[in-house]
């Protein structure tokens, strides 16, 4: 069984949302709680951080160049070189405690992003949104404690999306226009499993899921059967993406938030970026077409 290796011991408070940039051969991810974007280049070991004065909750490559991001309450274009955030689509969020969390582009260039109550009060106030290439957005589903994921089947006809406090990953049917239907339970985690967090799909159509408070990443078959699991030396595993020249290396983000002093002593690599040589080919991160 392949072992997870910490390639950047950065102690992220909430490392999240990794994407693989094929042109740069680098992985980008965010620290939501520290308002920054990170880049790690495996071939050189170079690690770089961009600090912002506002919360950056996710980053996704644009097919036109640059990035689309979610900030606390809006969709925005992100220029890392200039350090600029250009708001393009503010979302009507009445509760100031709400913020965006995870986001992912689908194969048709649409961006899907969910919100959550940042106080984690237990209210099911999280909403799943879709941002289209014309920069219009719409609500797609609601009633989430903490939205996470999403991920898409190879043919784009199935979307996986998670309510982490409910320990549930749902599957939806997706049509060509981006409408969703037939919401159903795909995987239900037990207490021992922790909480399902960020996800990605490999080239065989299997779903890889980060276990927050579960110490591992697991691979599930398209019918929801556990195929294998990869242990990590940290509890709060947040998300994953395939990268590397052959797309067979899994890059995994983790978090230090909520860990007490004793837990931090026992998990000195918490908040680090890890890599796992899986021997299984993944899929290239999709880009936003707007």
Image: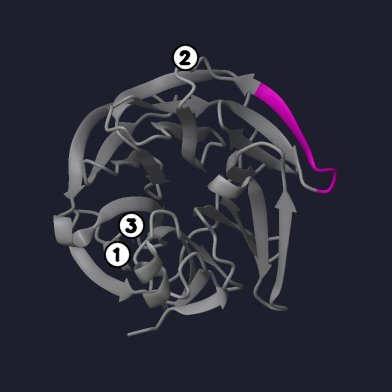
Q: Nearer the viewer, residue 224 or 36?
A: 36
In the shown orientation, is residue 121 left or right of residue 176?
Answer: left
Boundaries of the magenta span: 81-88
Q: Nearer the viewer, residue 81 or 172?
A: 81
Residue 56 visible in the shown view: yes
**Cβ atoms under marks 1 and 2 closer than 8 Å:** no
- As drawn, 242 above or below 34: below
Q: Secondary structure at mark 3?
A: strand
Magenta span dominant secondary structure:
strand
Q: Which residue is mark 3?
A: 212
Q: Which is nearer the N-term, disc 2 or disc 3?
A: 2
**Badge 3 local density, few (<14 within 10 Å), some, or many (20+)?**
many
| Quadrant assignment, res 147 | top left
Q: Which residue is mark 2?
A: 94
Q: Look at 40% across and 50% down and name the residue there.
A: 154
Q: Which residue is mark 1?
A: 219
Q: Nearer the viewer, residue 193 or 140?
A: 193
- As drawn, 8 above or below 155: below
Q: Which is nearer the N-term, disc 3 or disc 1?
A: 3
**Badge 2 local density, few (<14 within 10 Å), some, or many (20+)?**
few
Q: Quadrant of the N terminus?
A: bottom left
């Amino acid at each position: 069984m392949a072992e997870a290796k910490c390639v950047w011991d950065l102690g992220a408070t909430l490392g999240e949302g990794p994407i693989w940039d094929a042109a740069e051969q680098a992985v980008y991810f965010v620290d939501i709680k520290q308002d920054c974007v990170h880049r790690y280049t495996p071939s050189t070991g170079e690690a770089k951080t961009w600090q912002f004065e506002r919360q950056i909750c996710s980053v996704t490559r644009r097919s036109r160049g640059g990035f689309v991001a979610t900030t606390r309450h809006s969709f925005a274009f992100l220029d890392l070189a200039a350090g600029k955030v250009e708001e393009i689509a503010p979302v009507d969020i009445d509760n100031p405690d709400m913020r965006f969390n995870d986001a992912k582009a689908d194969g048709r260039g649409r961006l899907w992003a969910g919100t959550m109550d940042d106080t984690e009060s237990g209210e099911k106030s999280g909403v799943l949104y879709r941002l289209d290439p014309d920069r219009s957005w719409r609500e797609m589903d609601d009633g989430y404690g903490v939205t996470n994921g999403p991920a898409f089947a190879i043919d784009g006809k199935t979307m996986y999306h998670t309510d982490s406090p409910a320990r549930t990953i749902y599957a939806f049917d997706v049509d060509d226009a981006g409408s969703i239907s037939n919401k159903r339970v795909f995987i239900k985690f037990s207490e021992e499993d922790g909480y399902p967090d960020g996800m990605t799909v490999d080239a065989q159509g299997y779903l890889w899921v980060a276990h927050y408070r579960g110490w591992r990443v697991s691979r599930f078959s398209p019918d929801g059967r556990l195929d294998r699991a990869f242990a990590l030396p940290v509890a709060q595993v947040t998300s994953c993406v395939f990268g590397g020249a052959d797309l067979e290396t899994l890059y995994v983000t983790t978090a230090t938030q909520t860990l007490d002093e004793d837990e931090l002593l026992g998990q000195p690599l918490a908040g680090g970026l890890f890599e796992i040589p899986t021997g299984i080919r993944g899929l290239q991160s999709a880009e936003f077409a707007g």
